[in-house]
């Protein structure tokens, strides 16, 4: 890539650059950044803008082997120098670099840091492509690429921590370059991308998407023999280095070029967090869950945990939270974000062959020397492993290819609505930098090691905000007491609050107080929570079917105890007619299934106050006749 002209921030503002050597400029003049250790601290803070950076991470970046006893004091000196750069007389700098329980956080705007500007332009370019504005997409993506002045942080890569961040930045650049090149090819301007693609392929010879774009650009420029030679070189390299063949998508591109003229073929675009399966029933904009969303972004964004499980009852908003996080983490996963539902529409679990086939379609993966068609057809799958004989072989080949793909890419895979551990155990990455975000009603205790986030009921304020988005803030303010009764009667369940809002949005004549009275009636509440084809009872029934027969009976007995606000272990043993040890096992089985909630902090089993979500309790009454 050619070196662009120097770009500066508005007059009086410091502009930092990581896309090349670490630099800071004020009104176009480069500022001194001090000794190397001070620059390492600044680079680490800038590489995680507006995100807390733990002291341990800064320490490892500066002293990877043997930090001195004065490391924390020295870090304070280096952070103080960063504050001086960011504000006059240190006052503004103190506001911009803050220290909290999560570490040091550097607040910085898009116009002050080239990586933030790069990410913004890249997102805008992809959005333009999604709208069909290819010319606008090419312009925005090219503008993003022009911010690069060379390998990121190339003067500080002897620090392992900084080198890792630089590697992530370089991967993002490659992905955007691929997006831009493919867009130019689609526009009929392949020649502008040929030379740059050749240079990048030489530096990243195993990156298939780059090579596919290079092949296409040569082919569309009338250089067919060179395009075919690119594939042949790649095939030999893959066999020599990895013992593998090019992917079926790459092979299909090669075959399409044989004996043909300039036929426009655009490689697969960057994968997004979408699924061909039906979307969740909830339709409102994402609301609430700030703590859980922040935790999810921190855990997946820092790359320390490769598997995260978000659990909660049906209708708790697990899918909405997962998709929101996936969209916000676009820059952390340059090879894409994909979502696959692990259940069918009727709530039954899909077999592993079906899931692998869908992942293969979304990510361009297929098993070697096997017919994926045998594995992808639900009718052919006689068992969770995809049937017998050839079907099992095809599924095994898909599984191996999926593991190989994960080992070579940095992507986020959302496995949505997982019924049990067995459904996903073979899908999780064994190596590489892919991350998996699982949503499930139960807690999937058999999966380890994973990071777990349990979704509680919405707080009153969050639930009221969601209701107000649907019925209007004015109507909410007209009778806030009734609105509060509505969301509490919904048990803080996001789906129930949303259905209430959708129903009230249609029944404009219905006073909030009257609807609150209806929901307070335990014999009729579930009948009221229906809006069109969205039914809270239907969703709860799906969760009920996940429970074992014994757990359903126990839940029916405990639901009556929960009406007063919760129950203790002693009361559970009395209601179940069993001893203490059996009661503990019964209650903890329901906790694991997501049907009973327990205190967030540590407390003895006898002192704990357990709860059954209100609407689940009402459904249990209906089914068990308690």
Image (tube, rainbow, N blue to C red):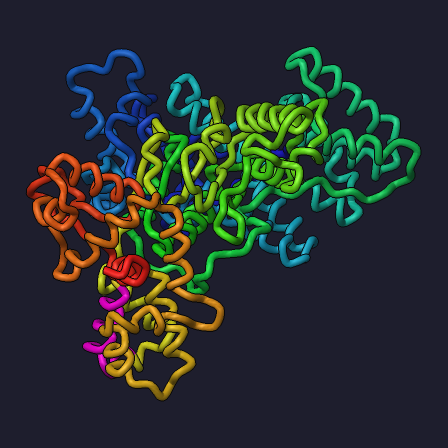
Q: Is residue 207 visible?
A: no
The location of residue 603, given as percent across then percent down, is: 10, 39
Q: How many marks?
A: 0
Query: In the rendered structure, does residue 477 fall within the stretch colored magenta?
Result: yes
Query: In the rendered structure, does residue 604 fall within the stretch colored magenta?
Result: no
In the shown orientation, is residue 66 left or right of residue 573?
A: right
Relative depth, front residue between 271 and 578: 578
Specify the segment rendered in magenta: 476-490
The location of residue 144, given as percent across then percent down, is: 56, 44
Relative depth, front residue between 179 and 622: 622
171 to 510, vertically: above or below: above
The quadrant in which residue 305 appears is top left
Relative depth, front residue between 139 and 461: 461
The quadrant in which residue 18 appears is top left
* Figure quadrant of the C terminus: bottom left
The residue that appears at 82% across and 22% down in the rendered structure is 229
The residue that appears at 32% across and 77% down in the rendered structure is 473
* Figure quadrant of the N terminus: top right
The residue that appears at 45% across and 30% down in the rendered structure is 425
The location of residue 607, given as percent across then percent down, is: 6, 43
Relative depth, front residue between 460 and 9: 460
In the shown orientation, is residue 467 left or right of residue 146?
A: left
């Amino acid at each position: 890539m050619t070196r662009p002209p120097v770009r500066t921030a508005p007059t009086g503002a410091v502009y930092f650059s990581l896309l090349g050597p670490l630099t800071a400029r004020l009104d176009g003049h480069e500022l001194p950044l001090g000794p190397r250790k001070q620059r390492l601290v600044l680079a680490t803070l800038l590489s995680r803008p507006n995100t807390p950076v733990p002291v341990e991470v800064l320490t490892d970046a500066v002293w990877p082997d043997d930090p001195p006893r004065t490391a924390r004091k020295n870090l304070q000196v280096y952070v103080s120098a960063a504050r001086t750069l960011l504000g006059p007389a240190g006052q503004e700098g103190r506001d911009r670099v803050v220290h909290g329980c999560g570490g040091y956080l550097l607040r910085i705007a898009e116009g002050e840091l080239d990586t933030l500007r790069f990410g913004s332009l890249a997102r805008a370019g992809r959005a333009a492509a999604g709208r069909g504005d290819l010319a606008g997409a090419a312009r925005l993506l090219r503008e993003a690429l022009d911010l690069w002045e060379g390998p990121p942080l190339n003067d500080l890569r002897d620090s392992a921590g900084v080198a890792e961040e630089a590697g992530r930045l370089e991967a993002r650049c490659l992905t955007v370059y691929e997006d831009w090149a493919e867009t130019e090819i689609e526009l009929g301007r392949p020649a502008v991308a040929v030379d740059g693609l050749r240079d990048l392929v030489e530096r990243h010879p195993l990156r298939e998407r780059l090579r596919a774009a290079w092949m296409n650009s040569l082919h569309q420029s009338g250089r067919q023999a060179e395009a075919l030679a690119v594939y042949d070189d790649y095939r030999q390299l893959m066999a020599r280095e990895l013992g593998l063949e090019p992917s079926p998508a790459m092979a299909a591109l090669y075959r399409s070029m044989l004996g043909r003229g300039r036929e426009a073929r655009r490689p697969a675009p960057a994968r997004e967090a979408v699924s061909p399966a039906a979307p969740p029933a909830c339709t409102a904009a994402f609301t609430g869950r700030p703590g859980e969303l922040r935790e999810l972004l921190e855990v997946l964004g820092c790359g320390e945990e490769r598997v995260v499980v978000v659990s909660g009852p049906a209708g708790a908003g697990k899918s909405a939270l997962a998709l929101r996080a996936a969209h916000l983490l676009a820059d952390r996963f340059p090879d894409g974000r994909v979502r696959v539902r692990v259940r069918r529409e009727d709530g039954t679990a899909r077999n592993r062959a079906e899931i692998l086939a869908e992942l293969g379609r979304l990510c361009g993966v297929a098993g070697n020397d096997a017919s994926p068609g045998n594995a992808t057809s639900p009718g052919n799958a006689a068992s969770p492993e995809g049937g017998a004989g050839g079907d099992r072989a095809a599924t095994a080949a898909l599984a191996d290819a999926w593991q190989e793909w994960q080992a070579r890419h940095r992507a986020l895979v959302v496995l949505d609505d997982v019924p049990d551990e067995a459904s996903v155990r073979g899908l999780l990455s064994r190596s590489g930098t892919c991350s998996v975000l699982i949503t499930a009603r139960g807690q999937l205790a058999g999966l380890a090691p994973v990071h777990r986030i349990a979704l509680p009921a919405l707080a009153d304020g969050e639930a009221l905000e969601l209701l107000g988005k649907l019925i209007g803030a004015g109507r909410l303010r007209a009778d806030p007491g009734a609105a509060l009764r509505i969301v509490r009667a919904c048990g803080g369940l996001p789906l129930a609050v949303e259905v209430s809002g959708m129903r009230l949005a249609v029944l404009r004549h219905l006073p909030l107080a009257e609807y609150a009275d209806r929901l307070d009636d335990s014999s009729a509440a579930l009948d009221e929570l229906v809006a069109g084809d969205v039914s809270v009872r239907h969703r709860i029934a799906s969760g009920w079917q996940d429970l074992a027969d014994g757990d359903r009976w126990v839940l029916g007995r405990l639901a009556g105890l929960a009406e007063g606000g919760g129950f203790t272990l002693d009361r559970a043993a009395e209601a179940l007619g069993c001893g203490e040890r059996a009661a503990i096992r019964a209650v903890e089985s329901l906790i694991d299934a997501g049907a009973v909630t327990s205190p967030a902090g540590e407390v003895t089993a006898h002192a704990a106050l357990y709860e059954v979500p209100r609407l689940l309790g009402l459904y249990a009454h209906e089914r068990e006749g308690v």
